[in-house]
Image (spheres, helix red, strand yellow):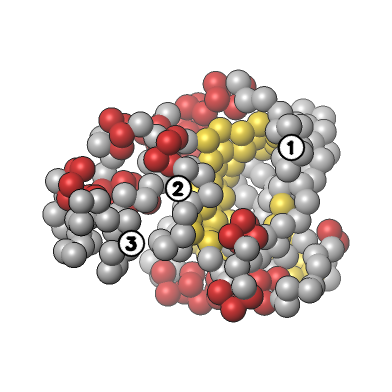
């Protein structure tokens, strides 16, 4: 963690460098609660996803419950609408004039006890250049270590400024929010995947969002990300067998024998 204008800043690692390893990413995540991964996907892939999601962003209606500002447009069930989004789930477009989202922990969806945190991990990837001014995701480094009584302050959060293809990966108990877009004509778009522990129910019901016919076209890794895999020794079975075997005929090193 380095200092930026008197505030801590998330560590940045480059996925294009061989020196960046999964173990290194995990070590930083556990210490800081979040890490920025540069070049997680190519800029060409980011542009393709941006193109695929445009009609879905354009067709979204404001969140009537207020969790997302009225200027934020969303897209969900991405695996069902874009081949480029094979490992992504949600998309967000923050338009000019958008207010900041309330700082929150995604883990709170599961009402976990403090001893069980974190239960989620999120990865938000930029499709456009994201800056402090156009509403980059803000987060508080090391807030995953706080006691439950500790409340976040807006001035403690820092923006995760990203180039297209860069990503912010963060733990579910790290305080974060969508930033305010104070520009006049610059929107920012991101896509994300939010994963929970395999014994828990995903926040977004992918079984309803993605038709089974579409799921059959995906690779086993994506099928398991959607929840069709079995969590050993037997959570999520179908006909007392691994759904990957029953539904898709998958036999690999991750297929579970009950």
Residue 239 horizontal/vertical position (percent): 20, 51
Q: Could you say whether the residue bearing mark 3 is in a helix, strand or loop?
A: loop
Mark toward the viewer: 2 or 3 = 3
Mark toward the viewer: 3 or 1 = 3
Residue 186 horizontal/vertical position (percent): 73, 32
Q: Is residue 239 visible?
A: yes
> Could you tell me how far apart the alpha carbons at marks 2 and 3 are, in whole angstroms?
32 Å
Per the rendering, the mark at residue 131 is: none
Q: Is residue 135 visible?
A: no
> Could you tell me how far apart the alpha carbons at marks 3 and 1 are, in whole angstroms?
33 Å
The residue closer to the viewer here, 249 or 92, is 249
Per the rendering, the mark at residue 65 is: 1
Residue 224 horizontal/vertical position (percent): 32, 52
Mark 2 = which residue?
41
Res 63 quadrant in image: top right
Q: Residues within 10 Å of mark 3 (few under 14, many from 20)?
A: few
Q: Quadrant of the C terminus?
A: bottom left
The residue closer to the viewer here, 3 or 117, is 117
Q: Is residue 5 above or below residue 41?
A: below
Residue depicted at x 14% and y 54%: 251
Label total for image: 3
Relative to 92, 101 lies left or right: right
Q: Residues within 10 Å of mark 2 (few under 14, many from 20)?
A: some
Mark toward the viewer: 1 or 2 = 1
Relative to 173, 256 lies left or right: left
Q: Residues within 10 Å of mark 1 (few under 14, many from 20)?
A: few
Res 207 quadrant in image: top left
Residue depicted at x 24% and y 51%: 238
Q: Is residue 128 above or below residue 156?
A: above
Mark 3 = which residue?
235
């Amino acid at each position: 963690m380095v200092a930026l204008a008197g505030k801590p800043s998330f560590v940045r690692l480059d996925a294009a460098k061989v020196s960046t390893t999964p173990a290194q990413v995990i070590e930083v995540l556990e210490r800081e609660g979040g890490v920025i991964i540069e070049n997680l996907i190519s800029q060409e892939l980011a542009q393709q996803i941006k193109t695929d999601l445009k009609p879905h962003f354009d067709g979204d209606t404001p969140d009537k419950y207020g969790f997302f500002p009225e200027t934020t447009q969303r897209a969900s069930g991405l695996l069902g609408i874009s081949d480029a989004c094979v490992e992504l789930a949600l998309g967000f477009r923050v338009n000019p004039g958008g207010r900041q989202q309330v700082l929150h922990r995604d883990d709170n969806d599961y009402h976990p006890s403090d001893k069980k945190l974190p239960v989620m991990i999120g990865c938000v990837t930029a499709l456009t250049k994201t800056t402090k001014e156009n509403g980059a995701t803000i987060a508080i480094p090391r807030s995953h270590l706080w006691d439950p009584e500790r409340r976040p302050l807006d001035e403690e959060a820092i923006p995760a400024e990203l180039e297209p293809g860069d990503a912010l990966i963060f733990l579910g108990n790290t305080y974060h929010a969508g930033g305010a877009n104070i520009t006049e004509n610059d929107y920012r778009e991101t896509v994300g995947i939010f994963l929970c522990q395999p014994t828990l129910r995903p926040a977004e019901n992918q079984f309803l969002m993605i038709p089974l016919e579409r799921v059959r076209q995906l690779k086993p890794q994506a099928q398991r990300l959607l929840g069709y895999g079995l969590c050993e020794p037997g959570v999520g079975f179908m006909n007392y067998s691994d759904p990957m075997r029953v539904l898709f005929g998958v036999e690999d090193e991750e297929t579970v024998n009950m």
